[in-house]
Amino acid sequence: MSRRERQRRRRRNRGSPLKSVVAMAAVLVVCAITVGALAIAGWVVNVAQSAPNLNTLKPYVPGSPSQVFASDGTSLGYIWSPTVHTKIAGDRIPQMLKDATVAIEDRRFYQHGALDYQGIVRAAIKDAAEGGNGLQGASTLTMQLVDNTYLPHRFKSNHDLKYKIVQAKLAEQLEGEHSKDWILDNYLNDVPYGTVGGQTAYGVAAASQMFFDRPVQKLSLAQFALLAGLPQAPSEYNPFLDKKDALRRRNEVLQSMANAGYITQAVADQTATKHLEIKVDNTLQEHKDPYVFDFIEQQAARDLCPRTPNSCKPLQQGGLKIYSTIDLRKQALAHQAIVDHESLLAEQGHGTAGAAVASVNTANGHILAIATSGSYADTQVDYATSAHRQPGSSFKTFALMTLIHDEQGNPNSTYYVSKPLSPGWLSADPTWEVHTAEDSYQGTINITKATILSDNTVYVQLAADLGWDKLDDTARAMGITSPLDGNPSEVIGGLRVGVTPLEMADAYATLANGGSHVPATIINKVTFPDGSSRNFGNAAPTRVFPYNEAYEGTSVLKQVVTSGTGTSANYGCPVAGKTGTANNLENAWFVGYSPRMSTAVWVGYPQGNIPMNDGFGGALAAPIWNEYMHDASSGYCGNWAPPDVAFEGKPFFGPFAVTGQPVTTPSTTGTAKPNTTTSPSGGTGLGTGTGTGTTQTNNPTLFAHPPQPGGGTKSTPPPAHNPPTGGGGATPPATH
């Protein structure tokens, strides 16, 4: 071989330098891609491994409105909740709705696993062609269920690649544990379908009621299609917000069903011509007797969330069943008693006066009725439970029981002089004057007669002797919860804040049941979604008075009805009670009880403390009380059984009392003095008292309850004492 040939061969073997560079570059690119792919794969694996496993996650269960019931099981309505969720069994979900959902959301649902790789490729190509984000789309029903029910918020707050990896991992685990049918049923039960009136429907059962006002089993094909199309964009396709888009989406679902072979093209075309067939459902917004409903909701919040009653999540989203104590029959009778006396209420000089009735079961404190004359459209203030007003002489009962319990004073043998009390009679309030409107006085009388006649002059002397703080302690022990200040005028109703009818009914029930206080409640039982329950209707009674002391107080108050200021309350059965008339005839009361029911009636102007033409408790409140108690008692006419050991008591000797025996003191009669003095506080509006000023007190007629004074200043009380606790005495026999 010549030298030239050898050189030529060497050049051929060496090759082109450019080719070598290209080859090397190719090798490096392949290596880089491989390394990059391995790095990405490692990152994906790391993300998946660091993500939580399905068995460590608690599935999200949407909240649902709590339902309220009357004592007989009648539904009173639902408490508002931001979410509405009604879970139903899979075999109760119509197959046509399942088919529509699969057709529009995941046509290959039964063919692929947790992930649809063909769908992912199609979505990627589509997004690339349209300039979208390749991470969007291609979510299977399993992935959507994971997203709505299991995926922690920290992952789904950003729909990035990490979110998709975690979603895919959990979807694979979910499909490994459950069947396709289980996944579809849970999807249809748990995904959001849209929001109406601030409430979001989760699941097809809630959505069917919200958009069509009918059970899901009774929907038409057109309604199935509309429902199936909502989860993709609940706001955009909401038929109450955008009918045009909702109609387009519904027809898109119908076409998908035809393409998938679930319905024929002819059926799809025919159904597409129909209207949306939507209907507003007001079930969740309607409340039977809204005043009662509101009070039930308020007390349930206090019972379930005593520290945060204004933000009680279990109540708003707990799906609770709240069984109240309200008796719908007695509630209707209380309303009717007010209505039947509207003509009387209309004669009071400033338009029709308002009225309220509150009635409780004396044995267990269950609230039976809380009726008001108000219109919920005009005011949401329930007079029976929220209107704090001056109780007038109905507050004297607490002084009567302080005498009997604290001092073992016998009201029949404890005497005071009924007389005008001029300024200076009480050193604690030198300007306070107390007298009767007709200046008619009884002379020396015992406490029983002073109660029957509702003599203010006797009772303010008695309270001064007993001690005003003692009187307040008795009132609190019996059930009064409004503020009390120990002012001299409180005994005849001069309270700074006032009391509600419900408070007074609750307090008088302490005497009705023989001396034990049971806090009034309108909640009987609450049942939770897991089937457990809490009983709020069996509060333990607190013994306040021995039975014989309570019986003694009742014996006095029975005479108020049979021969005193409360004769208009007498319907022929054993009952006891007390009238109350506030300053300037601004509020009229009758509070009384039978062995089974304690009821308070208030009459007055809701807009403020406005004088009424005939604003006496015996004239306005007692007739309403009479009708309600007669009708609500359903023929019951039982009496209190005498105690095994009778209360004897003894004369009470206080600085203002006489010797404990009758003293001949002539009655005095003078010219009537109209009450024209008003309280400095004004005394206007609900919950505004008149117990801090200096006003005179009058008693216009013998059998009409006297107005209260404006008050008097708080003075140094007598020595402290223990509030009523029951003490000794006989135990109560059964009433009859």
Image: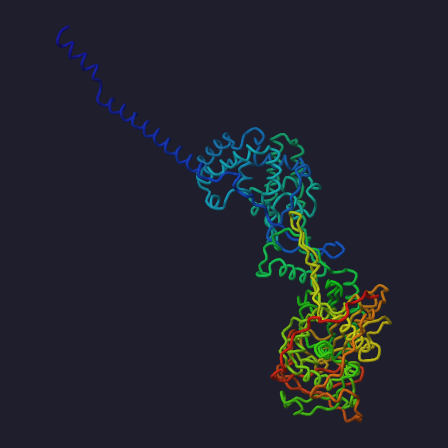
Observer-nearest of 595 and 328: 595
Observer-nearest of 198 and 333: 333
Q: Relative to 292, say whether 646 is above or below.
A: below
Which of the colour schemes (rainbow, by chain, secondary structure, one colour) is used? rainbow
Quarter of the image holding residue 438?
A: bottom right
How many numbered markers are drawn?
0
Image side of residue 493 versus residue 664, left or right: left
Q: Residue furthest left?
A: 3
- Residue 678 picture location, percent across and down: 66, 85
> Residue drawn 59% across and 38% down?
252
Q: Residue furthest top?
A: 1
Q: Relative to 487, say whether 113 is above or below.
A: above
Q: Quadrant of the N terminus?
A: top left
- Residue 610 picture location, percent across and down: 69, 79
Q: Relative to 637, say whether 240 is above or below.
A: above
- Residue 58 picture location, percent across and down: 55, 43
Q: From this viewpoint, is residue 501 visible? A: no
Observer-nearest of 463 and 35: 463
- Residue 734 picture location, percent across and down: 81, 65
Q: From this viewpoint, is residue 651 visible? A: yes
Q: Quadrant of the C terminus?
A: bottom right
Quarter of the image holding residue 422?
A: bottom right
Image side of residue 673 versus residue 143, left or right: right
Quarter of the image holding residue 408?
A: bottom right
